[in-house]
Image: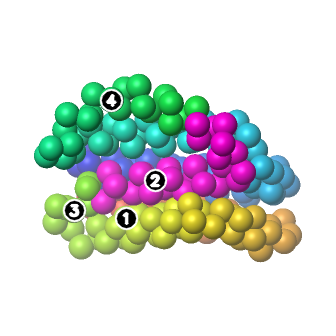
């Protein structure tokens, strides 16, 4: 099983779960999405995950003369997490979600890079959509609320969006199991 297959299975399972929850409990999804931008703990947890993941990524890079500074990441990362939680609390959850989407796109693109199938472009496009949305959330986190208000005007819109995610998840799982 290739790396792209594993990544596509994970993305497909996430899409299946999100679609199923949106279809079965649209009111709960609507409440959760509208409350997310001002949620404290999801933002803190996502910010900590983002900063640890970014620090790990920096330790893997060859930085030339800056390699000597990598040892300081072990104490700078917890300090950065504390400072981020303390002073960047305004709309931290959408910002941290944007950072997570940016970080998550990297391994997916790495897995798709050398796969010989032309169908790898589907996962590549998904990763680039994550990058675009992640940048939007990092730079303008208030857009999250605008997009959520537009997408959750009524429960039938949530159910339709959930059905689209459900079918996309099934398609991605089939792609991962049969093509990659």
Quarter of the C terminus within the rendering: bottom left
Identify the element where label 3 is drawn: helix
Secondary structure found at label 1: helix
Magenta highlight: main SS: helix
Q: Is residue 84 magenta?
A: yes
The residue wearing badge 2 is 11
CA separation in Å, label 2 and label 1: 9 Å
- Over which residues does the magenta segment extend? 83-109
| Quadrant position of residue 108 | bottom left
Place of residue 18 in the rendered image (x, y in percent of width and height, measured from the top left) = 63, 53
Please name the residue shown 66% across and 42% down the image: 87
Quote the CA–CA distance across marks 1 and 3: 10 Å
Task: Say which quadrant the N terminus sits in.
Answer: top left
Foreground mark, 4 or 3? 4
Within-10-Å neighbours for mark 3: few <14, some 14–19, many 20+: few
Q: How is the image coloured?
A: rainbow
The CA span between labels 1 and 4 is 35 Å
Q: Nearer the viewer, mark 2 or mark 4?
A: 4
User: Quick check: 57 above or below 106?
Assistant: above
Numbered tag placed on residue 123 in the rendering: 1
Name the residue located 75 percent from the left edge and 71 percent from the top edge. 146
Verify CB contact (< 8 Å) between mark 2 and mark 1: yes
Residue annotated with mark 3: 113
Please tell me the numbered disc located at residue 72.
4
Was residue 41 drawn as part of the magenta stretch in this picture? no
């Amino acid at each position: 099983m290739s790396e792209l297959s594993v990544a596509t299975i994970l993305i497909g399972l996430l899409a299946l779960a999100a679609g199923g929850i949106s279809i079965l409990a649209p009111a709960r999804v609507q409440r959760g999405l509208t409350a997310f931008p001002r949620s404290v703990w999801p933002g803190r947890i996502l910010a900590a995950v983002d900063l640890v993941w970014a620090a790990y990524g920096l330790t893997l890079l060859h930085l030339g003369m800056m390699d000597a500074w990598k040892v300081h990441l072990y104490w700078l990362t917890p300090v950065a997490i504390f400072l981020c939680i303390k002073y960047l609390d305004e709309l931290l959850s959408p910002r941290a979600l944007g950072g997570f989407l940016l970080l998550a796109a990297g391994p997916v693109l790495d897995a798709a890079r050398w796969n010989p199938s032309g169908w790898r472009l589907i996962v590549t496009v998904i990763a680039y959509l994550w990058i675009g949305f992640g940048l939007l959330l990092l730079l303008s986190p208030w857009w999250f609320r605008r997009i959520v208000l537009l997408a959750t005007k009524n429960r039938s819109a949530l159910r339709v969006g959930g059905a689209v995610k459900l079918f996309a998840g099934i398609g991605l799982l089939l792609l991962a199991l049969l093509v990659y």
